[in-house]
Amino acid sequence: MAILTTENRANATLVTMTEKRLDAKIAVAFKEEMAAIINAGATLLVLDLSNVGFVDSSGLGAIVTSLKLLGRKGDLLIAGVKSDVMTMFTLTRMDRVFQLFPTADDAVKSLEGK
Amino acid sequence: MPFVHLSGNGDFDHVRLLGVAVRAIAETALAPSDAAQLEIAVVEACNNIVEHAYANTKGIITVDIFLTDQKFVVNLRDTGKAMVDAHQIKDSTALDFDIDNLDDLPEGGFGMFLMDTIVDERKYFSENGINTLTLTKYIQP
């Protein structure tokens, strides 16, 4: 079962996490699905986490793995991070690594013209 | 002193349930944001048990919760391999990475750092084949 859905929005690929938790149970599946999306040629990605209420360090690591796979030729923006999940980003300084946006629409808009 | 005893299999399905249960119980004593952080600490501790103590063999995780006016204490026990390098002192080297250098970004290794950042005390000991990790969060009056 897919845990990520994708949708083309302007020049971005909007990737929506459908599960409520991004944790050790699904971190591997997340990495595999993200790798498939990136290997299919997507370079400007918006990851919508608005359905997600919990992220552990395995889940966060899986997002970092995806960013590394994308490399410098693309962008991975993150949207819709809830406050409890934001804590995970700030405690680990990942709020300074990723560009975070309140909504997927905001993130998609920021990529226009890229 | 209220006391709750939980246990589950040492796998990631049960780690989810234990984390959610501890958070719900913590919300009776702590601010919601503190209870949410405690869930992170407990899940990180349980993930370590699944990945390192049991190393994907079968085992049970036991979670005992003690509640006083001053403290919310979570005791996690397993019968797997003992941790040899359970730093008692907060190790901030987990954050020693260059945020502008893609290759330098860590894909893990935050577990212990997160526990130490979230709880006020972390104690670990191993005796007679039982490993006990105690996470204590002080309750603000």
Image: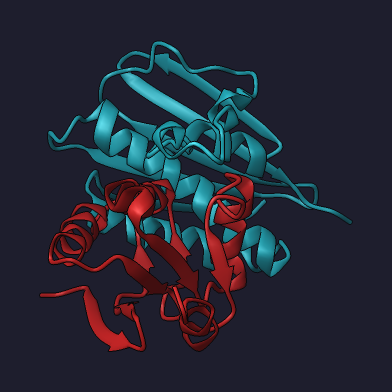
Chain colours: A red, B cyan
- Asked which quadrant contains residue A101, the reply is bottom right
Q: Position of residue B42 (x, y in %)?
A: 48, 47
Residue B104 in the figure: left or right of residue A34:
right
Q: Position of residue B72 (x, y in %)?
A: 67, 49
Q: Is residue A28 above or below residue B134?
A: below
Residue A96 in the figure: left or right of residue B138:
left
Most distant residue in the front direction: A113
The quarter of the image holding the C terminus of chain B is bottom right
Looking at the picture, tell me which residue is in the foreground, B43 or B5: B43
Count numbered badges in the picture. 0
Q: Residue at x 59, y 63 (%)?
A: A86
Q: Is residue A53 above or below residue B5?
A: below
Tell me, yes or no, if residue B113 can be seen here: yes
Tell me, yes or no, if residue B79 can be seen here: no
Residue A74 in the figure: left or right of residue A6:
right
Q: Position of residue B56 (x, y in %)?
A: 15, 36
Q: Residue at x 62, y 61 (%)?
A: B35
- Asked which quadrant contains residue A87, the reply is bottom right
Q: Residue at x 36, y 59 (%)?
A: A74
Q: Residue at x 27, y 56 (%)?
A: B14
Looking at the picture, tell me which residue is in the foreground, B86 or B92: B92
Most distant residue in the right direction: B141
Looking at the picture, tell me which residue is in the foreground, B51 or B136: B51
Q: Position of residue A98 (x, y in %)?
A: 52, 57
Looking at the picture, tell me which residue is in the foreground, A32 or B66: A32
Residue B23 in the figure: left or right of residue B53:
right
Q: Is residue A80 above or below residue B115?
A: below
